[in-house]
């Protein structure tokens, strides 16, 4: 996952009235919309959109996790399978509410008034389901809900890996919250590894 | 546990507080009269052997008196309340020279759009701050209220001001702070699960300080 | 004490064959059985509503402490026994809803309307017994729908018992979907039950009065139930209509209350309160009527100003239709309208004052017997006064700016609904219990229950006035978020402790109620030496009530009449040629 050119500056967040959160940032809180390290783009959601054998696929019992820490979501972008436990943690000693606003199905809106963990599941696939906190309007996260396990999110160094695909030709889609979508084809052979590189840039 | 209102900080708070204390005294007297009367009757007219109650169906004179007294009293309270209501909430009551702000309420935050250095709303130097409102002292302030989602209520206890913020409806409220300091602002209408945390702070500056604050604010905005 | 202290066994009228159990006690058409069915149902809801209040109080008194027994609640309500804000909002909503619609209203109207109207007017049953049966059996599914909301995904309705749109109209704002819809459906169904009941009451009172039972010989309880039935008939359809509109907004995409598509949130408030204020009087007028009966009985004196008491009831009922805007002074409604609503609201103080002073006039120079119903009735007067006087603060629009949506309002409504209606109900239940079940409730435990309830009621609700004066908003999950409310935390904790005790002492009432059913002293026909027609038949009265239709000779409150030795003169006693001063045009 690469990013060419100068990434746009991320806006600072005015968190003054949540001192517990501000204390967690040495240089002041910033909204990490576009995260680029050495030309590599993080927080991109990648998934297979075509070419997969017919499901259903086993649902992992391992939960997908998201944390609210310092009045921001970590990770900001993640994937979860339909039916897979989605574990929401609040590491801040104050109220966050988690409002999932999908357009294909009914969302949920739950609160965590103190440090605690709550588990929910998604029932309908949708890429992406935005999460928001209405107490802190700047808090945003995006959840890719899929009906198969072949998805990944690019890490801080821009890398990602989708494993366990049977041999075949696949369409792979990348999604970024502000930079949009990219599509690629990839052919996977039995037991082999294929590298794909999506290119985003300041000009596109 | 006190019947005294908390300290006030706006021009019309005194009028509202006066009405409150007036009603407190009137209802206090009525309360004592009725409750003492009840207790007195309970003791004095308790059942005793060989006694029969006084057979009567009522007294027009007594009933006239206790109809007239409450009627006159409540009408008087109404007459005293009316001008204060018009002064505070009347449709055209806001002073013409008021500094105009816009408050955009949404679940669960208050966004205050300040008129900026030129003192006029909807110009380029406006800026919006979350959950903090800065106003000058001794100057009328008119707040235009907008809601993005559900009904909220703009409540500053120290200013004795409360006005629902209704989506799709342009409501407004005015006040004039009489002393500098920080005053809490809360949401008074149930607006969802974060209702209890929908609070903000109003900072009242003296005139010079307000100008200085605006100027410093303008530089930080320019930097960004 | 009573003139005929021989315990009577129920004597069925010969023309009535014995009904099978299911027709007699389940799908009953006998107004007395239906009244008792409503009694059982609404007392259960009263308990549930109280339980919800205890959870609310726990959260306000001890915000960060797990609630005792709270761990039985699922993780969506109270993880680790600490309530979640969304569940707190559901509790606030459902406490109000259950108490108003499923406890107080059916207790007053469903129970005593059914039980008292035919017996007190000398009728064998209601005009439409089968309609009456339906009125109960429609209320049951409404109750089930309402309770079902606690078990659906997203939790129960959480927009307050007033369900202000758009919070109530769109699930995305509250996270509540099915819960709010069940809430609306339940109220629409319950509305049908109320309308059937009200039609029945009105028809019965107009048509089935015994010979001689003229309008001005009706007891105040019947007068108040008659006026209440008219209010129900006119007000409930407005709620049902509004509920259906809101239901459509949620389910089929109409936009009555959705401003983003041209709807009006204030329309809901107007509809709700146009129903809601008459509703408030539905919740107090029957209590006033029954208290009038009990106070006249307890004081052994005719009711002071019988006629003006009736006119005051009518005046309150009429004014009740033109004051709804006082709930909306700060809502964004045109402030000029606020002025008009302030005047009409202030005027309600006048008939209310007439009633209070006439009750006091009734006690004046009486020979007051402090039986348990009388203790509750006098408490009603004492508490209703506080509720009425605190209303004047809100009626004054400028003062309302400050106290609107604060605990002052919470204190006010509880002084009227608990201090008023519920004390009247405790009195009424104790007063008519012997007639309903043929047994007396225990007097000692009745007095203990009254005393403790009176004390803890005041310790719970009086300090709420002070919270309101301090600016404490309603429906706050955790008031400690506000600095200016932190000094009030101690008061909140005090209220919580009192409320827990208030709830606990209701066990005494529940036990007294249940144990007396089996162990209570057998009730004579007329245990309270009263004049009403219901006291001339056995306790409990047989199917069909009266063996022969009674004839009424005089008004209902002829206590201590000079015409007779004893201090009461039943309505149906024929004194022959003796002149009856009370049948001459009365005073007042």
Image: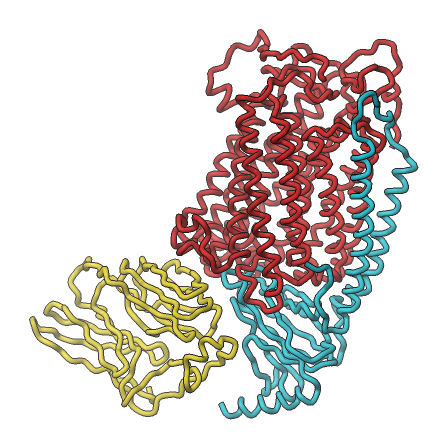
Left or right? Give the position of B153 relative to A156. right
Can residue C129 be seen by looking at this rendering?
Answer: no
Left or right? Give the position of C223 relative to C263. right
Q: Residue at x 29, y 90 (%)?
A: A4
On the rendered image, what quadrant is the N terminus of chain C found in? top right
Question: What hue represents chain A?
Answer: yellow
Q: Which residue is drawn at 53% across and 66% down?
A: B197
Image vertical order of residue C17 relative to residue B88, above or below = above
Q: Residue at x 78, y 29 (%)?
A: C368
Image vertical order of residue C99 relative to residue C254, above or below = above
Quick one: which residue is furthest to the top in this view? C14
Where residue B24 sits: x, y (%)? Answer: 78, 56
The cyan one among the chains is B
| Foreground of the two, C324 or C481 | C481
Q: Which residue is drawn at 50% across and 55% down?
A: C88
Question: What hue represents chain C?
Answer: red
Where residue B14 sits: x, y (%)? Answer: 78, 69
On the rendered image, what quadrant is the C terminus of chain C found in? top right
Left or right? Give the position of C223 relative to C257. right
Where residue C576 sits: x, y (%)? Answer: 84, 9
Quick one: which residue is furthest to the left in this view? A190
* Quarter of the rendering containing residue C359: top right
């Amino acid at each position: 996952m690469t990013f060419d050119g100068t990434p746009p500056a991320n806006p600072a967040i005015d968190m003054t009235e949540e001192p517990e959160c501000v204390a967690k940032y040495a240089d002041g809180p910033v909204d990490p919309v576009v995260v680029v390290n050495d030309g590599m783009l993080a927080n991109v959601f990648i998934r297979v959109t075509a070419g997969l054998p017919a499901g259903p696929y086993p649902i992992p019992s391992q939960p997908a996790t998201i944390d609210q820490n310092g009045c921001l979501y970590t990770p900001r972008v993640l994937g979860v399978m339909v039916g897979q436990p989605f574990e929401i943690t609040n590491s801040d000693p104050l109220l966050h509410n988690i409002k999932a606003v999908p357009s294909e199905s009914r969302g949920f809106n739950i609160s965590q008034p103190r440090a605690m963990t709550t588990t929910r599941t998604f029932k309908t696939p949708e890429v992406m389901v935005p999460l928001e906190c209405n107490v802190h309007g700047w808090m945003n996260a995006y959840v890719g809900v899929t009906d198969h396990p072949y998805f990944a999110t690019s890490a801080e160094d821009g890398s990602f890996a989708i494993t366990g695909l049977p041999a075949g030709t696949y369409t792979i889609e990348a999604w970024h919250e502000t930079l949009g979508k990219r599509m690629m084809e990839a052919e996977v052979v039995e037991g082999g590894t294929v590298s794909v590189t999506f290119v985003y840039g300041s000009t596109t | 546990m006190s019947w005294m209102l908390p300290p006030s900080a706006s021009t019309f708070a005194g009028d509202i507080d006066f009405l409150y204390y007036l009603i407190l005294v009137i209802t206090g007297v009525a309360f004592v009269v009725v409750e003492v009367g009840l207790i007195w009757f309970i003791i004095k007219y308790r059942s005793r052997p060989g006694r029969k109650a006084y057979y009567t169906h009522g007294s027009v004179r007594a009933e006239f008196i206790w109809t007239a007294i409450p009627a006159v009293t409540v009408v008087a309270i109404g007459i005293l309340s009316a001008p204060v209501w018009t002064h505070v909430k009347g449709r055209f009551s806001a002073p013409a020279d008021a500094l105009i702000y816009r408050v955009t309420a949404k679940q669960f935050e208050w966004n205050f759009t300040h008129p900026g250095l030129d003192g006029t709303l909807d110009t380029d130097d406006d800026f919006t701050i979350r959950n903090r409102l800065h106003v000058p002292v001794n100057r009328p302030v008119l707040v235009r209220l907008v809601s993005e989602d559900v009904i909220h209520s703009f409540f500053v206890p120290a200013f004795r001001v409360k006005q629902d913020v209704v989506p799709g409806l342009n409501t407004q409220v005015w006040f004039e702070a009489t002393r500098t300091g920080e005053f809490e602002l809360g949401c008074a209408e149930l607006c969802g699960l974060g209702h209890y945390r929908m609070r903000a702070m109003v900072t009242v500056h003296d005139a010079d300080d307000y100008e200085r604050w605006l100027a410093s604010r303008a530089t930080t905005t320019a930097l960004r | 004490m009573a003139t005929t202290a021989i315990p009577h066994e129920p004597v069925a009228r010969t023309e009535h064959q014995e009904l099978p159990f299911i027709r007699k006690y389940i799908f009953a058409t006998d107004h007395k059985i239906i009244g008792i069915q409503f009694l059982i149902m609404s007392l259960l809801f009263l308990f549930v509503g109280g339980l919800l209040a205890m959870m609310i109080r726990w959260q306000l008194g001890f915000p960060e402490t797990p609630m005792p027994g709270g761990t039985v609640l699922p993780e969506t309500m109270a993880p680790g026994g600490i309530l979640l804000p969304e569940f707190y909002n559901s509790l606030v909503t459902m406490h109000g809803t259950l108490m108003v619609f499923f406890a107080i209203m059916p207790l007053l109207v469903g129970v005593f309307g059914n039980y008292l109207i035919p017996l007190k007017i000398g009728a064998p049953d209601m005009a439409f017994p089968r309609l009456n049966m339906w009125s109960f059996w429609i209320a049951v599914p409404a109750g089930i729908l309402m309770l079902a909301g606690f078990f659906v995904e997203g939790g129960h309705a959480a927009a307050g018992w007033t369900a202000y749109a758009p919070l109530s109209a769109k699930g995305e704002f509250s996270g509540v979907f099915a819960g709010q819809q069940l809430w609306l459906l339940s109220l629409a169904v319950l509305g049908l039950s109320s309308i059937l009941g009200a039609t029945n009451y009105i028809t019965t009172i107009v048509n089935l009065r015994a010979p001689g039972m003229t309008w001005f010989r009706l007891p105040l309880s019947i007068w108040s139930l008659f006026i209440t039935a008219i209010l129900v008939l006119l007000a409930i359809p407005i709620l049902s209509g509004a509920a259906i509109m809101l239901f459509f907004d949620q389910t089929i995409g109409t936009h009555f209350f959705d401003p983003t598509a041209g709807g009006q949130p204030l329309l809901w408030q107007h509809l709700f309160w146009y129903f809601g204020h008459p509703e408030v009087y539905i919740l107090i007028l029957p209590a006033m009527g029954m208290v009038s009966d009990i106070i006249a009985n307890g004081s052994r004196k005719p009711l002071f100003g019988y006629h003006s008491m009736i006119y005051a009831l009518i005046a309150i009922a009429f004014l009740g239709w033109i004051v709804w805007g006082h709930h909306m002074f700060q809502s964004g409604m045109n402030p000029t309208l606020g002025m008009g609503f302030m005047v009409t609201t202030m005027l309600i103080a006048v008939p209310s004052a007439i009633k209070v002073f006439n009750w006091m006039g009734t006690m004046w120079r009486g020979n007051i017997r402090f039986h348990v119903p009388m203790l509750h009735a006098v408490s009603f007067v004492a508490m209703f006064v506080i509720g009425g006087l605190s209303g004047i603060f809100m009626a004054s629009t400028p003062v309302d700016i400050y106290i609107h949506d604060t605990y002052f309002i919470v204190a006010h409504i509880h002084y009227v609904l608990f201090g008023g209606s519920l004390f009247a109900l405790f009195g009424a239940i104790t007063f008519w219990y012997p007639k309903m079940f043929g047994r007396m409730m225990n007097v000692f435990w009745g007095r203990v229950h009254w005393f403790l309830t009176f004390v803890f009621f005041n310790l719970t609700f009086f300090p709420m006035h002070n919270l309101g004066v301090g600016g404490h908003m309603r429906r706050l999950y955790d008031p400690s978020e506000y600095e200016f409310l932190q000094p009030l935390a101690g008061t909140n904790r005090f209220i919580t402790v009192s409320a827990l005790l208030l709830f606990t002492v209701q066990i005494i009432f529940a036990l007294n109620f249940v144990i007396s059913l089996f162990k209570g002293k057998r009730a004579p026909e007329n245990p309270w030496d009263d004049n009403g027609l219901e006291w001339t038949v056995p306790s409990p009265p047989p199917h069909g009530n009266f063996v022969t239709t009674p004839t009424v000779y005089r008004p209902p409150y002829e206590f201590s009449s000079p015409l007779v030795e004893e201090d009461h003169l039943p309505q149906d006693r024929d004194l022959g040629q003796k002149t009856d001063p009370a049948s001459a045009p009365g005073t007042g």
